[in-house]
Image: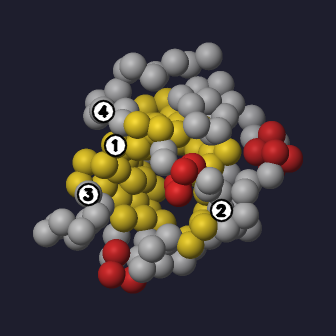
């Protein structure tokens, strides 16, 4: 198993609090690098997923950018094939596109989450990614 739990660029942070972890299958950690509500109006969080962890389907009204910094993971938009992600990958997610992202079964996964156009509103959390959907990924 690819263990990157201590091999990271930014601090891993703490386990997600209940208001966020309820939208994840598995354990994830968050370290906000640029908190919401600052003068920069561009929240950036370092998100670390344990192997097999993934978030629910969701949408960001203002869009999101993922900057992959470690491990191996997945990103999928509704109706499209999942994309395998590796360090250095950049995913630009337009506003209101239904998607999910998370770790592969055998690797930690770390990305920076950049929320864009935050004035459009908060993320809308939807249904979990089913085990059947997730287990089909190689």
Secondary structure under tag 2 reads loop
Secondary structure under tag 1 reads strand
Q: Residue 30: x and y, percent?
A: 41, 43
Which dot marks residue 14? none
Comes first in the chain, label 2 or label 1: 1
Comes first in the chain, label 4 or label 1: 4
Residue occupying image coordinates x 45% and y 23%: 5
What residue is disc 2 on? 57
Alpha-carbon span between mark 3 and mark 1: 9 Å
Tell me the quadrant of the picture where the N terminus can be found. Answer: top right
What residue is disc 3 on? 35
Residue occupying image coordinates x 39% and y 53%: 113
Along the horizontal axis of the image, is 14 left or right of 107? left
Q: Residue 50: x and y, percent?
A: 56, 31
Alpha-carbon span between mark 4 and mark 2: 26 Å
Q: Is residue 102 above or below residue 119?
A: above
Please rate how many residues cluster around mark 1, counting C-alpha atoms within 10 Å: few if below 14, some from 14 to 19, many from 20. Answer: some
Residues tagged 4 and 1 counted as in contact (Cβ below 8 A): yes
Judge by depth and name the residue closer to the eye, 25 or 70: 25
Comes first in the chain, label 4 or label 3: 4
Which dot marks residue 11? 4
Is residue 81 in sight in this rendering? no
Please rate how many residues cluster around mark 3, counting C-alpha atoms within 10 Å: few if below 14, some from 14 to 19, many from 20. Answer: some
Quadrant of residue 73 in the image? top right
């Amino acid at each position: 198993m690819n263990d990157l739990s201590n091999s990271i660029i930014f601090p891993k942070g703490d386990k997600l609090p209940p208001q966020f972890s309820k939208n994840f299958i598995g354990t994830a950690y968050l370290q906000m690098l640029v908190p919401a509500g600052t003068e920069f109006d561009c929240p950036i969080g370092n998100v670390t997923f344990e192997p097999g962890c993934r978030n629910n389907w969701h949408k960001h009204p203002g869009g999101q950018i993922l900057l992959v910094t470690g491990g191996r993971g997945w990103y999928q938009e509704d109706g499209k094939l999942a994309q395998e992600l590796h360090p250095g990958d950049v995913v630009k997610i337009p506003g209101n596109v239904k998607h999910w992202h998370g770790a592969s079964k055998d690797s930690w996964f770390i990305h920076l989450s950049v929320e864009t156009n935050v004035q459009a509103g908060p993320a809308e959390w939807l249904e979990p990614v089913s085990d059947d959907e997730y287990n089909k990924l190689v």
